[in-house]
Image (tube, helix red, strand yellow):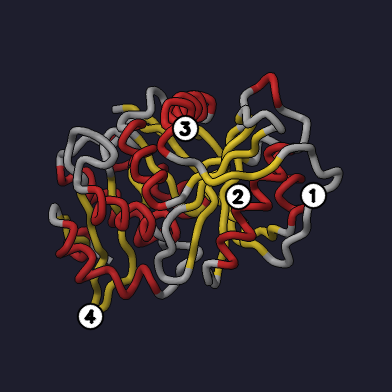
């Protein structure tokens, strides 16, 4: 596999024309590129930040075998690779001269790319987070069921959602959450955010779902403010959006967890989520 087999693409329609069938061939493992490119398609190239996104594909003998993308300021996202493909991608990325703050991908792929990037550039790659991708099996209502009720968020909830999204981004190490307001607008318009609220209508927790692409919907984000945790609100609202995703016709309902958080991993498994694959996040320093 040669670096020249990778092709840098700056145009989303061209990327989807070349890689769309490949991405749809494995909807679960490709959930992030599927949902992010759908957001870029519907919300425009500034959906995630001021700088334009960029993409790439690995083509061999006329067939796409892998893909990557980056939406600055976020890290590179890459589909599963062999060690040889990871090494050729590191050489290709180094040759583009574009800044690369890190990578997120299937665990073995991310580790191989991090090692190859260090060899190719002399930079440093440090582990940032380990994640696990889950797929919903049989939905089980969590017990005990908390008091309150689920409600799809509307325009009147925007200020609350923006604040919680920023708090969520800070909690998971993503910083200032650029485009939080446009994110809330898009999710509200799509009916993609659900609140768990108490009897007087005060919001207690939230869970979102991405639009359905290639038959898959991903639950994200799930957030409960720190003073309200441990009372079952996150489990209840996650179960509710999972049920809604199934009712909408999704073949696969997915979510990611931080493997350093045993509470959330245990919770989602009680609801009925089963492991699919482990992912890893690395930070790069020049």
Q: What SS does tag 3 mark?
A: helix
Q: Nearer the viewer, residue 201 or 203?
A: 201
Location of mark 3 (residue): 157
Q: Which mark is residue 142?
A: 1
Question: Dots 3 and 1: beta carbons under 8 Å?
Answer: no
Q: What SS does tag 4 mark?
A: loop
Mark 3 or 2 closer to N-term?
Answer: 2
Q: Is residue 144 visible?
A: yes
Q: Is residue 21 above or below residue 81?
A: below
User: Closer to us: mark 1 or mark 2?
Assistant: 1
The residue under the point 46% across, 24% down is 163
The residue under the point 50% across, 41% down is 153
Q: Position of residue 239 (x, y in %)?
A: 68, 52
Query: Dot 3 surroundings within 10 Å: few (below 14), some, or many (20 or more)?
Result: some
Mark 3 or 4 closer to N-term?
Answer: 4
Specify whether 158 is left or right of 146. Answer: left
- Number of marks present in the image shown: 4
Which quadrant: the N terminus? bottom left
Location of mark 4 (residue): 61
Question: Dots 3 and 2: beta carbons under 8 Å?
Answer: no
Location of mark 2 (residue): 132
Q: Quadrant of residue 115?
A: top left
Label 3 vs label 4: CA separation? 51 Å
Q: Position of residue 271 (x, y in %)?
A: 74, 54
Specify whether 150 is left or right of 69. Answer: right
Label 3 vs label 2: CA separation? 30 Å
Query: Dot 4 surroundings within 10 Å: few (below 14), some, or many (20 or more)?
Result: few
User: Closer to us: mark 3 or mark 4?
Assistant: 3
Query: Dot 2 surroundings within 10 Å: few (below 14), some, or many (20 or more)?
Result: some
Q: Position of residue 162 (x, y in %)?
A: 42, 28
User: Closer to us: mark 3 or mark 2?
Assistant: 3
Q: Position of residue 75 (x, y in %)?
A: 35, 39
């Amino acid at each position: 596999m040669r670096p020249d087999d990778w092709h840098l693409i700056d145009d989303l329609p061209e990327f989807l024309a070349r890689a769309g069938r490949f991405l749809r061939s494995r909807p679960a493992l490709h959930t992030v590129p599927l949902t992010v490119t759908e957001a870029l398609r519907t919300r425009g190239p500034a959906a995630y930040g001021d700088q334009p996104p960029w993409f790439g594909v690995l083509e061999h003998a006329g067939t796409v075998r892998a893909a990557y993308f980056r939406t600055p300021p976020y890290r590179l996202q890459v589909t599963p690779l062999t060690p040889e493909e990871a090494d050729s991608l590191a050489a290709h990325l180094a040759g583009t001269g574009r800044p690369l703050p890190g990578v997120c991908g299937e665990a073995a792929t991310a580790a191989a790319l991090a090692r190859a990037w260090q060899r190719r550039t002399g930079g440093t790659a440090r582990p940032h987070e380990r994640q696990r991708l889950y797929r919903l099996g049989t939905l089980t209502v969590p017990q005990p069921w908390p008091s309150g009720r689920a409600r799809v968020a509307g325009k009147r909830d925007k200020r609350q959602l923006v604040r919680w999204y920023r708090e969520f981004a800070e909690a998971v190490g993503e910083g200032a959450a650029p485009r939080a307001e446009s994110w809330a607008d898009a999710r509200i318009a799509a009916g993609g955010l659900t609140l768990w609220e108490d009897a007087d209508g005060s919001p207690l927790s939230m869970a979102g779902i991405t639009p359905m692409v290639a038959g898959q919907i991903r639950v994200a984000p799930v957030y409960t403010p720190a003073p309200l945790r441990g009372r079952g609100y996150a489990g209840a609202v996650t179960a509710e959006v999972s049920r809604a995703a199934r009712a909408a016709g999704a073949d696969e309902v997915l979510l990611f967890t931080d493997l350093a958080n045993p509470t959330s991993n245990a919770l989602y498994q009680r609801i009925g989520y089963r492991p699919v694959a482990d992912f890893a996040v690395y930070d790069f320093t020049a």
